[in-house]
Image: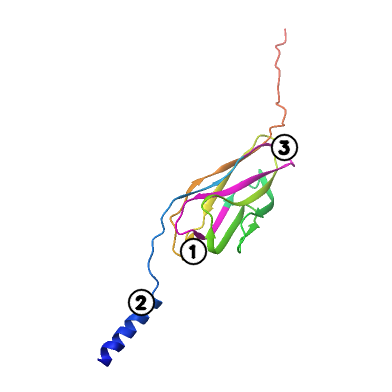
Amino acid sequence: MKAIHLALLILVGLLTITPAASAATGTGTLYVTNASDVKMGSTATVSIYLKNNFEPKIGAYEILMYFDNEVVKPKEIEIQQSNASFGNIFADHVLVNGISAYGYDNGDLLLATVTLEALADDGSVSELRVWMVPDSFADINNDDLPMPAIQNGTFTTKDDVPPVITLNTPLT
């Protein structure tokens, strides 16, 4: 009888310390807004969003936004979510990440705004490529979430360069 009680006690102990497996459901789209016709030396602000309906809620993310550093230069990044979220500026990308034990809201989740300066005046275009770092996207139980769909944005400088017109007239 003591052996049965001991076996049951061990079984109950193992069940209480073994986490239950759960699969996250839902979908999401990671996207960045556009900036158009930005004059050289002027700035424009783009926003990084994660539209989602994940259940359980998002608990952690790490996102990179790449750009052409000959066309655009990041001036400031403003994090829009609380709970251990931060952003960093690098030469050719910005980093936005966060972690929350309570989870981030579903819907259109504004993660950050990034102020960018135009470095050209010739109508140059830089793709704003967003990317979710693999193994950084997890729910509040620290289980991996399916990677969201990606929608990149663009940053376009204003074309202020006058056209060069050469007239060739025949000599008569």
Q: Is residue 67 visible?
A: no
Q: Secondary structure at mark 1?
A: loop
Residue occupied by mark 2: 15
Labels 3 and 1 touching (C-beta < 8 A): no
Q: Quadrant of the C terminus?
A: top right
Q: Position of residue 159 (x, y in %)?
A: 69, 32
Q: Position of residue 121 (x, y in %)?
A: 71, 36
How packed mark 2 is, by other alpha carbons closer than 10 Å (few <14, some 14-19, many 20 or more), is few
Secondary-structure class at tag 3: loop
Query: Quick one: quadrant of the N terminus?
Result: bottom left
Quadrant of the rendered image containing residue 72 = top right
Please tell me how crowded label 3 is: few (under 14), some (14-19), or many (20+) other residues with Cα within 10 Å: many
The residue where tag 3 is placed is 39
Q: Which residues make up the magenta segment?
A: 35-64
- Secondary structure predominantly adopted by residues drawn in magenta: strand
Q: CA distance from mark 3 to mark 2?
A: 63 Å
CA gap between label 3 and label 1 equals: 43 Å
Q: Are marks 2 and 1 in contact (CB under 8 Å)?
A: no
Where is mark 1, residue-wise?
140
